[in-house]
Image: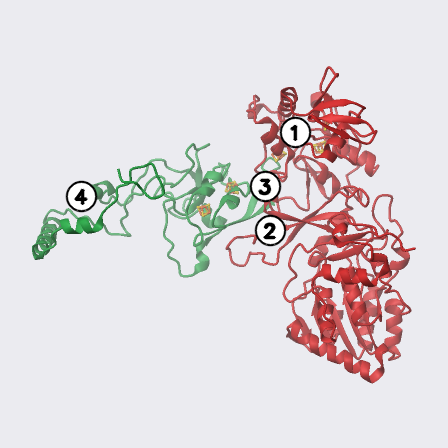
Amino acid sequence: MTPVKGGYAVDVPVIHVSERARQEHATVWSTFKAFGVTLRRLFTSLFKGDTPTIYYPEQTRPYSERFRGTHILTVRDDGSLKCVACYMCATVCPAECIYIEAGEHPNPEIEKFPTRFDIDMMRCIYCGFCVDACPEEAIIMSREHHQSVYNRDETIYDIEKLMARPGIDAKGPGYRPNRPMAEAKIFDKETQTVCPIPSVIQERHPAVLYESMIRRRD
Amino acid sequence: MPKLTIDGQTYEAEKGKTVIQVADDLGVEIPRYCYHPDIGIEASCRMCLVEVKGAPKLMPACATPIAEGMTIRTNTERVREAVRYAMEFLLLHHPIDCPVCDQSGECWLQDYYMAHAGHDSRFPLGQKTRRRKAFDLGPLVKLDQERCILCTRCVRFTRNVTRTNEIQVFNRGHNSEIGIFEDRPLNNAYSGNVVDICPVGALTSSDFRFRVRVWFLKGTPSVCAGCSTGCNLRIDHSARAVGGGIPGYTATDGKIYRTVGRRNVDVNKSWLCDEGRLSFHALERWPRLRTAMTGGQTRAVIQLLPSIHEHFESIRKAYGDSAVAALVSATHTNEALFLTKKYFEGRVDFRLGREVELYEQRQDDLLRRLDKHPNTRGALDLGLGGEWNGLSGFLRRAETKEIRGMWISFHPQLVGEDAPEILEDLRELIAALEFSVVSTTHDFGWARAASVLLPMASWAEETGTYTNYAGRLQITNRAVMPPGDAQPLHMLMAELLKLSGVQVSHDPDAVFDWIRREVPLYSGVDHDAVGSLGATPAQPV
Ligand code: SF4
Ligand code: SF4
Ligand code: SF4
Ligand code: SF4
Ligand code: FES
């Protein structure tokens, strides 16, 4: 066991860099070996169709169910926002990127709702704290992460955009609380309906599985 | 004075006090809901139970008068158990609306639950008694009957303080609820106080509801500038930039969200009138003036001051010292008034209307006074009401060209409207003057005719002292930053005095020290002694 500076009790492997360099015999011969690998790869992908690459962005690899992408505001059965403007998310947010203005809801049973709910996606660090803090499961995350826009203003998502983004359900939901209180529902803009978020992932573009990628690297 | 022992410590206390009052004085914490020092005793919540030696049962500290040789224990297991059960009863049918409840963050139920209860509810959420939610009791107050713990603080407030009796307990037993008679809304002039004293989220303010969460707010102790009573209040304002990084929504100047009463037994007990409570909205009534203007051009204040000084000097040289004067208003701090008096060598007046007649007169039995200026007494004590005869006197002198250059400093009244004839007179005064400097908080049409227009900090944007109708010196604090280039009047005057060769600090404390040296009335007053509750200087013999 190597004594570690700082006194950690765990056994941390320490890599001795110059030692390792001495063991690796990088000669001209290794260069030709590398050419060999390249050639073999060329033939397998040309004739066997075994390609490690995919046609991104048309194809994507499946993301984890806990992927923390851009947020979704979930809705009630009647299609109204579930959020009650409690400001828990805005309070916990370390990036201070959630801006809420609350209003008086006509129904005294609901009482409070956001008249404005903006998230600055450029400032967001995608930590998911807001999802954990929400007492209503009103905010969850998606697996969407593209921020390609023509104008920075478009990266500030308002209620409309957080609630219903076309195709948001296609990739399935991302990060949600561990014990969902109720089935989160989202608003589908294309069909104008409320739909439960599918819990099983359906990939639109079946691509090379991430797992097989990892296996090949070993 | 009876001696008593609380938690092993022996104290001496005044006869006639209750146990909870003595504990409060000594800093021993006893939880309570229904007890409030200014509204009478009810002893209904049973949170304040303490163990008294010799008494078979636990006693409510709020309703037990002290006696000689009493031995009290506040933290035995028996007491803790009783408080835990009291909390469980109070929360039995409580809706736990905290996410939407405006009290959340300053709720006594939340605080005491964390400190003394911590139980799991034995009552399923779906079976709790439902009552009426979020309906108006009056223009300023909303009631949620489900959240009410029936402490009757609000009932006792309308019974014993305002004596208007709007709020009552209706029905009995489990059906008891707080309410009003249909035809008698809670619309007395002090209705907002019930929101302050309600320990839970049952009574909320229609004005403040949902505008911000209380934990984003910072409280600054200050004094109301709504009338000459000078009620103590706390200004709750944004503590950090609200809106995070979202461009355009970030309040950098700071924003006042509400004011709440601050207890001062000698001035306002715990109360504020509704007009005073909402008076901070007056600052938003007109657009604020953010930059200095002269001849239709905007300029930096600091660049303008030397030329203002030169103008006054040249008028003084040409027509004598008495051709230059200043008109201020009794809404300025003592510090600002004093420095103005120094720079204008006593040729200053503050009387716009009838404030001197009115400043001691009551508007009602509780707090309000007819003079809607906070510092009329202060201006009088500084000797500003000389032979100038106020605004009308200056107007006459300006028309006869006796006065040619003037500094006019105007804060609008925060409560009520400034009389239209005052504004008309100001307009005429500016027209009659050769050179006029107007420093004001808002962009008023009449002020634009002035030779120089300077932006000025308003109430809550400057620190200083006011003297209330009874001569009590109290500190008003800066809670938020003035907008744009605006500065408090005492700073503008300090700069002018520097130009005329007198070194003055911008620090209001230092200015007050100068006042103490020069004004005999204030000589015995220590700025620290004024503290948060104010001090009345002894009358000079
Ligand atoms: S993911 Fe983190 S940074 Fe982004 S909005 Fe939520 S709490 Fe804020
Ligand atoms: S925590 Fe949830 S309910 Fe509260 S404001 Fe955020 S999204 Fe809305
Ligand atoms: S009164 Fe207090 S405990 Fe009850 S819902 Fe409001 S904040 Fe929560
Ligand atoms: S409304 Fe508030 S102050 Fe009035 S009885 Fe209920 S809890 Fe007490
Ligand atoms: S505070 Fe004593 S019974 Fe309520």
Nearest to viewer (mark 2 / mark 3): 2
Residue identifier under label 2: B239
Q: Quadrant of the N terminus of chain B?
A: top right
Q: Secondary structure at mark 2?
A: loop
Q: Residues within 10 Å of mark 2 (few under 14, many from 20)?
A: some
Q: Which chain is red?
A: B
Occupied quadrant, residue B486: bottom right
Q: Residues within 10 Å of mark 3 (few under 14, many from 20)?
A: many
Foreground of the two, B159 or B490: B490
Chain letter behind tag 1: B
Q: Secondary structure at mark 3?
A: strand
Quadrant containing ligand 5: top right
Amino acid at pointer 4: Arg
Q: Compared to A88, does B115 lie above or below?
A: above
Q: Is residue B166 visible?
A: no
Q: Which chain is green?
A: A
Residue identifier under label 1: B131
At which x and y percent is residue B159?
A: 82, 34
Residue identifier under label 4: A216
Chain letter behind tag 3: A
Q: Secondary structure at mark 4?
A: helix
Amino acid at pointer 1: Arg
